Amino acid sequence: MRGNIRPLGPHNIPDFDPTAMKMEARLLIDWHLPWKRGEQAGEDERQAYLAIWDGLIGELADAEKHILLRDLHSPNVIWQDGEQGVRQVGLIDFQDAMIGPTAYDLASLIQDARVDIPDDLARDMMANYLTLRRNSPDFDEQKFEKAFAIMAAQRNCKLAGLWVRLKQRDGKPSYMKHMPRTLRNLQTALAHPALAPLREWCETAGIEFRES
């Protein structure tokens, strides 16, 4: 019934705001830590963790922001032989797109949740990206690298809890095979000086980065 079809209005892409970031980061303390310990985190420990994330998220207030796919990793990147140039790279699974720190998608690509990225390749990917961005007069490399580390840590805290939730709540234990990679990626992100408070909290909490 063509005459009854109404044009859709503009779609407002939501912000990846502090509330959303913090809610995702909570998955580590809500699911991962109890799984490792066999008991819930103490209230003081929880509040300290959330306060750290308040501070880290605050550091992103002036970060460069663009549209984020939020699931930019290998299973969602499709090579298209019939295309040319950048159109050879096809992207799927963008229904959860938001507006947030540009560094997030690069972090999820370089620190792939499902495929091991060799350290040399990860460094080359970051170096190539930074080389391209340095041509922009508004690009602040140090600020971007800090945002990258915070977003990488946030994503991996989320995933470390998500894999456990998928196993325990949803009956999907196969995702646990990604846990060792997720913890290694988290450890890499925590090496940035801005992440020192979270790194110290994780060490005190007994997060085992090198779990096998």
Image: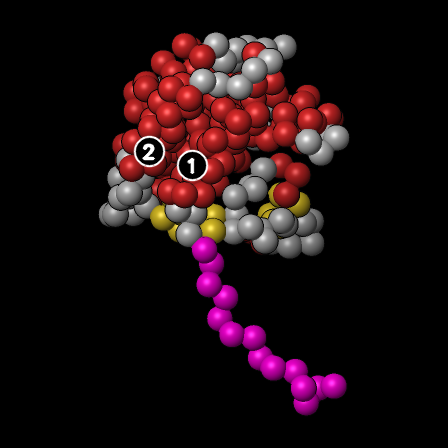
Quadrant of residue 22 within the rendered picture: top left
The residues tagged by marks 1 and 2 sit, at their Cα atoms, a distance apart of 8 Å
Task: Provide residue 27's location: percent of width, then percent of height.
Answer: 52, 30
Task: Provide residue 66's location: percent of width, then percent of height.
Answer: 40, 51
Q: Looking at the figure, which quarter contains the C terminus?
A: top right
Crowding around mark 1 (Cα neighbors within 10 Å: few <14, some 14 to 19, many 20+) is: some
Magenta extent: 1-14
Query: Can residue 125 be seen in the rendering of this structure?
Result: no
Q: Which one is in front, 131 or 168? A: 168
Task: Provide residue 8's location: percent of width, then percent of height.
Answer: 56, 75
Of the numbered discs 1 and 2, the one sitting upstream in the chain is 1
| Left or right placement of residue 116 versus residue 22 in this view | right
Task: Provide residue 67's location: percent of width, then percent of height.
Answer: 44, 52
Say which residue appears at 66% left-offset and 45% top-offset.
78
Q: Amino acid at mark 2?
A: Asp
| Left or right placement of residue 10 versus residue 54 in this view | right
Q: Which one is in front, 81 or 212? A: 212
Q: Which residue is mark 1?
A: 22
Query: Can residue 205 be seen in the rendering of this structure?
Result: yes
Q: Which residue is mark 2?
A: 54
Q: Would you say the residues marked 1 and 2 are in contact, meaning their CB atoms lie under 8 Å apart?
A: yes
Magenta span contains residue 3: yes
Q: Secondary structure at mark 1?
A: helix
Say which residue appears at 26% left-offset and 44% top-offset.
62
